[in-house]
Image (spheres, coloured by chain):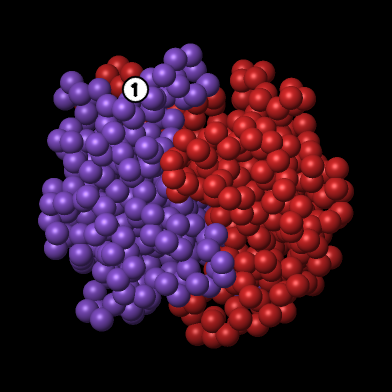
Chain colours: A purple, B red
Amino acid sequence: MSDLVGQYFDAAVAHLRRVRAEEAEPIDRAAVLLADAVADGRRIFTFGAGHSSLAAQDVVYRAGGLAVVNLLNVPGMTGVNVMPAPLGSALERVSGLATTTLDLTPATAGDLLFVISLSGCQVMPVELAAHARARGMHVVGVTSLAYPGRVGSRHPSGTYLKDHCDVVLDSKVAVGDAELRHPGAGTGFGSVSTIVTSALMQAVVVSAVGKLAERGITPPLFRSGNVDGGTDWNAELMAEHADRIYYAF
Amino acid sequence: MSDLVGQYFDAAVAHLRRVRAEEAEPIDRAAVLLADAVADGRRIFTFGAGHSSLAAQDVVYRAGGLAVVNLLNVPGMTGVNVMPAPLGSALERVSGLATTTLDLTPATAGDLLFVISLSGCQVMPVELAAHARARGMHVVGVTSLAYPGRVGSRHPSGTYLKDHCDVVLDSKVAVGDAELRHPGAGTGFGSVSTIVTSALMQAVVVSAVGKLAERGITPPLFRSGNVDGGTDWNAELMAEHADRIYYAF
């Protein structure tokens, strides 16, 4: 019997090692943007559609995470719990949905937006990134550069997410996001995109935390609710940054 | 300057290697339950609350994934987009929410439920797993066994998720889910839980795919919408399994 589990972990580890080796420089540039935004009192949002939303949510409202990172919650696009599920994929081709959501936030020039899209070719991420930049926001894109050229852009401009970013973090996930094959399976399987994309987002956050600390700024990190005083600390943190936290009263 | 990015990737890779080495046997047992459920026409659900929901969503409705895996979508618990966000954490302590949701599905004895909870100590995952087992369902728990003993159970029984499962996959994530430290940071940071938990879920899926293929059963895998014929194949797959797919009309 084939060792698919071993092959899967090998693929995930190889992917993480590759992005660590090859993306160190853009991770650092993204971390500078994030540290600057935290230090300068800027607003910070993350966005992804469908499965690309999972890594966006991974850095929001969590112990050991930055309290000032907000989710841009576009209706029907956050995760895979929209009903029916194919509506989520279909809405990525609808112009205006994510941009309208962004326009109803207080985000303005100099604020920071992370846009996560595995393929980077759908209308929604392209349009959102272009719109945010037109408003003067800084945009960090997390996408796989394996897609452009292999998969056509669905945006009228023919451009991809990568074309509308200040910094691009390349997840290097192969087209189809299926690392494994089996003669009896009919198609590829074994997705690594959430693992790699979450790692890239977390890497940017840990790097920004270090940069803030080394500037003498205490990073606004949530503490674990399981440690003494954690809950009180977190409440004070949210009160202190209430003017740019949009996920609580 | 400290190499926090390098430390973060090292921690993630070390974690993946450790679960690969130490969790091979429970991954195999969970994959047998999943392959049997697919082959026998059983209903399959995944659940997690808050950030633990991200890995649950990672194996639902995706290219290279099994079409018959459904998300148990408990209101306010899927991801971190409930407003206000602290409500999500608070609802984990409310008895009856997840169990009521499960009772409104057609799930019955012999069906399969994955319950993901990093700490495994909150009311919701404990209650849900116990309730599902009382109904005769098989339960696979994905949790960190570092928590029981270190963090008290919030369930009246004093038990943890691990105590109500047919198979436990131990993510081995340390209490607090913070791999890194910095003298200027005030608290730990650098979460690996989504990476490790997603890898465990994906590993179970790829192993089940292999088991089905080796039994001569074509695994019901979605194809990429980016390949020729993928969309038609997927529509046929959903029609074929419509009696146990609950995320579409």
- Residue reaching furthest to the top: A228
Q: Which residue shows up at 47% across the image and 25% down it? A: A224
**Residue A203 falls left or right of residue A33:** right
Q: Amino acid at mark 1?
A: Glu
Viewport quadrant of the C terminus of chain B: bottom right
- Residue reaching furthest to the front: A249
In the depicted structure, whether residue B180 falls above or below residue B64? above
Quarter of the view holding residue B166: top right
Find residue A162 and report its horizontal and vertical position in percent: 25, 64
Q: Which residue is mark 1?
A: A236
Foreground of the two, A186 or A72: A72
- SS type, badge 1: helix
Would you say residue B44 is visible in this rendering?
yes
**Residue A82 falls left or right of residue B2:** right
Would you say residue B182 is visible in this rendering?
no
Q: Which residue shows up at 54% across the image and 81% down it? A: B230
Viewport quadrant of the N terminus of chain B: top left
Q: Which chain hosts label 1? A: A
Find residue B130 and report its horizontal and vertical position in percent: 79, 38
Find residue B218 and report its horizontal and vertical position in percent: 73, 73
Q: Which residue shows up at 62% across the image and 32% down it? A: B93
Quarter of the view holding residue B146: top right
